[in-house]
């Protein structure tokens, strides 16, 4: 709500040429979801009357078929959302998709990834911007703001908002971190913990750009012509690299190819990297991705 209002205000300043408020009804809370949609439709009507340019509204209602992709509900819903955002952007010749992630979300993400044993790239947390699809970028312009600051903004501008009651359910790891772990750290150890974690993500993002450049250099020495959807590496050259560089390179390959990595622990990355140059090494990973080393090559890709 705050992001939509702030962007609508930019229309008057000609910083924003066109605004489409895209709302996803996840259909997971019945009437609660429908009431969310009613409020947002009403809010967009107010924005339309307050600006010189048209503020458009579009919505989609998800169902079980949209989420049947073999992962957690939260991940399925996120994938469905971004797929729909991409579709809208392409249909409307839009260059940016903005979401309202906050510094609180960033702190929760970093802490969650620490608990899961993430590597350096995972500790970069939520990126301020990234490519969504060709020609369309995904931006998080409120990532520097805390939730408290945004709520103050809403109150100052007399904007009514709704809270998702599932945010209070600790069966979700992120909620448990938000409701239990972060308050404990804040009260017992470090009052500024959220800012520190968000700041850590910023430092890691800067370091991650260095890692990307290094991974590209490694790839120039290791990668051979691919075979369809299989990435092919020179095994002899692979055996010349230390495990830490190979681990970094493997993560970059998975990111580039959009292969799933959520269930791969950093210890597993390390073990794979240590054995990557060994003739006969083979491992099957989440999402049906196989890594197989033979006499001359290392082949990575879907089975």
Image (cartoon, rainbow, N blue to C red):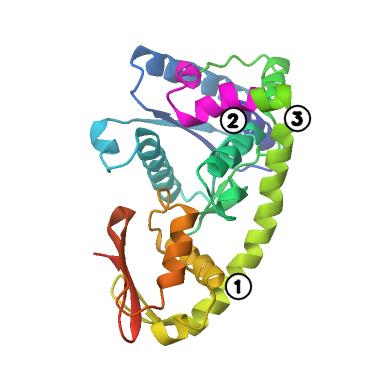
Residue 175 drawn in magenta: yes
Q: Residues within 10 Å of mark 3 (few under 14, many from 20)?
A: few
Circle 1 SS class: helix
The residue depicted at 68 percent of the width and 31 percent of the height is 9
Circle 2 SS class: helix
The residue depicted at 42 percent of the width and 66 percent of the height is 272
Residue 261 drawn at (x, y percent): 42, 53
**Where are the magenta residues, as a range?**
164-183
Identify which residue, 146 or 203, lies in the foreground: 203
Q: How many marks?
A: 3
Identify which residue, 266 or 142, lies in the foreground: 266
The residue depicted at 52 percent of the width and 25 percent of the height is 176
Residue 145 drawn in magenta: no
Label annotation for residue 4: 2
Label annotation for residue 214: 1
For residue 199, side relative to residue 38 (left or right): right
Q: CA distance from mark 1 to mark 3?
A: 35 Å
The image shows residue 9, relative to residue 264, as above or below, that is above
Circle 3 SS class: loop
Q: CA distance from mark 1 to mark 2?
A: 38 Å
Residue 156 occupies quadrant: top right
Residue 52 occupies quadrant: top right
Note whether residue 160 is visible.
Answer: yes
The residue depicted at 45 percent of the width and 52 percent of the height is 265
Q: Nearer the viewer, mark 1 or mark 2?
A: 1
Q: Earlier in the sequence, mark 3 or mark 2?
A: 2
Q: Earlier in the sequence, mark 1 or mark 2?
A: 2
The image shows residue 105, relative to residue 162, as above or below, that is below
Label annotation for residue 190: 3
């Amino acid at each position: 709500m705050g992001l939509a209002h702030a962007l609508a205000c930019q229309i008057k300043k000609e910083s924003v040429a066109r605004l489409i408020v895209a709302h996803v009804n996840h259909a997971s809370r019945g009437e609660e979801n429908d009431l969310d949609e009613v409020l947002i439709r009403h809010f967009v009507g107010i924005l339309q009357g307050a600006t010189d340019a048209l503020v458009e509204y579009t919505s989609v209602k998800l169902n079980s078929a949209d989420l049947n992709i073999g992962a957690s509900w939260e991940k399925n819903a996120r994938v469905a959302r971004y797929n729909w955002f991409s579709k809208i952007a392409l249909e409307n010749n839009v260059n940016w998709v903005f979401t309202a992630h906050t510094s609180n979300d960033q702190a929760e993400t970093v802490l969650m990834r620490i608990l899961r044993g993430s590597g350096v790239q995972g500790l970069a947390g939520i990126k301020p911007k990234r490519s969504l699809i060709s020609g369309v970028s995904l931006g998080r312009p409120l990532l520097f703001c805390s939730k408290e600051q945004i709520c103050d903004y809403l109150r100052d501008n007399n904007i009514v908002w709704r809270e998702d009651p599932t945010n209070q359910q600790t069966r979700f790891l992120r909620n448990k971190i938000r409701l239990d772990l972060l308050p404990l750290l804040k009260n017992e150890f470090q009052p500024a913990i959220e800012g520190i974690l968000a700041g850590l993500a910023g430092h890691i993002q800067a370091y991650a750009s260095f890692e990307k450049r290094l991974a590209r250099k490694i790839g120039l020495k290791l990668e051979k012509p691919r075979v369809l959807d299989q990435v092919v590496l020179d095994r002899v050259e692979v055996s010349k690299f230390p495990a830490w560089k190979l681990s970094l390179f493997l993560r970059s390959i998975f990111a580039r190819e959009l292969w799933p990595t959520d269930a791969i622990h950093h210890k597993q990355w390390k073990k794979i990297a240590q054995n990557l140059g060994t003739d006969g090494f083979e491992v099957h990973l989440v999402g049906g991705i196989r890594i197989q080393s033979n006499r001359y090559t290392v082949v990575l890709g879907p089975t």
